[in-house]
């Protein structure tokens, strides 16, 4: 009954069963989703969430698969992949309304070319706007909390609400959506400033060059693994502990940046989790600092 109704909502072309999530994450790791749905609009998302709730079936929402580590056993229930289905954009003065599936890099590039300032920090951040707001993604001393005025959220019961910047309760790499009021971003309103195309482009290029020179984007990875234990930095502590290059199975601490774990070849989620625990144990023993993961770890327990 559930499967039949799900097929009616999304049509067969948008539904994949037992789909390996390694095909949908930047780390190229992850077991199968019972159902992977690529919805075409907000109504489909709402119907899917309500149907799952009625049938007591778990729903997980992903974007472009960055900042994500999926269990080797996959994800139970329905995985909704929001990408090109929510990629609308409307510009009104210096306010930008943008869909959750819009690429952050694409957005930053387009807006800088139009002479808007405020999003240059995001020029090298992979993933989508929805994920960036959800986790308050940031770089270069700025983040999405600085530019997000409100976001349209769908909660786990299928209800929808606009939350203001204050209601989103942004803090370092977190928002209210992760635990306190679990929900998913459908679209966000960003407040930018008028600027210079030349200045924005130059700053964006500088940020891109910095990432290219210091981060291992030539290997499958999920971005930063740990939150920085400010005022210290996770990558620096890992480097001081001489852990760069350390490897368990196919998971390896990048030799370019200590806060990146790369898939050096056929890595499993188990490899990455064991390496994360080894890093945490080592840093606690050497520096008495407890590292917290920034990467989202989802799926069936192994």
Image (cartoon, grey):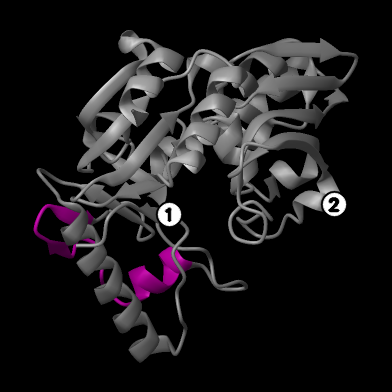
Return the residue at label 2. Answer: 166
- Label 2's element? helix
> Which quadrant of the structure image shows residue 181?
bottom right
Tell me the residue at 81%/12% (across/down): 91
Q: Where is residue 234 in the image (x, y as percent from the top left)?
A: 45, 67
Q: Where is residue 137 in the image (x, y as percent from the top left)?
A: 60, 45
Q: How far apart are labels 2 and 1 at the CA level?
A: 24 Å
- Residue 100 appears in the picture as rendered: yes
Return the residue at label 1. Answer: 295
Tell me the residue at 70%/13% (across/down): 89
Q: Tell me where the magenta segment starts and ends, as one range.
A: 234-252
- Which quadrant would the N terminus be assigned to in this image? top left
Tell me the residue at 34%/90% (across/down): 285
Tell me the residue at 16%/60% (across/down): 271
Q: Where is residue 248 in the image (x, y as percent from the top left)?
A: 13, 63
Look at the picture and state if 49 lies above or below 85. Answer: below
């Amino acid at each position: 009954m559930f499967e039949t109704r799900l097929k009616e909502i999304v049509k067969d072309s948008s539904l994949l069963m037992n789909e390996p999530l390694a095909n949908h994450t930047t780390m190229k790791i992850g077991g199968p989703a019972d159902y992977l749905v690529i919805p075409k609009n907000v109504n489909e998302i709402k119907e899917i969430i309500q149907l799952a709730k009625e049938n007591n079936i778990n729903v997980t929402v992903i974007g472009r698969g960055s900042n994500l580590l999926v269990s080797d056993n996959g994800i139970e229930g329905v995985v909704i992949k929001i990408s090109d289905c929510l990629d609308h954009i409307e510009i009104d003065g210096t306010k930008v309304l943008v869909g959750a599936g819009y690429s952050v890099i694409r957005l930053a590039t387009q807006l800088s070319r139009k002479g808007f300032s405020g999003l240059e920090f995001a020029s090298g951040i992979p993933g989508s706007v929805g994920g960036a707001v959800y986790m308050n993604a940031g770089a270069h001393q700025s983040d999405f909390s600085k530019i997000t005025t409100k976001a349209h959220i769908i909660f786990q019961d299928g209800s929808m609400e606009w939350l203001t910047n204050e209601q989103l309760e942004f803090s370092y790499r977190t928002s209210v959506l992760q635990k306190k009021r679990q929900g998913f971003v459908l679209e966000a309103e960003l407040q930018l400033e008028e600027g210079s195309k030349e200045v924005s482009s130059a700053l964006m290029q500088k940020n891109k060059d910095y990432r290219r020179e210091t981060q291992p984007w030539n290997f499958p990875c999920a971005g930063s693994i740990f939150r920085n234990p400010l005022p210290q930095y996770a990558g620096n502590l890992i480097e001081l502990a001489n852990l760069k290059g350390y490897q368990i199975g196919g998971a390896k601490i990048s030799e370019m940046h200590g806060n990146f774990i790369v898939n050096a070849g056929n890595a499993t989620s188990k490899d990455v989790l064991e390496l994360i625990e080894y890093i945490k144990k080592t840093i606690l023993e050497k520096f008495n600092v407890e590292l917290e993961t920034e990467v989202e770890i989802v799926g069936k327990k192994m």
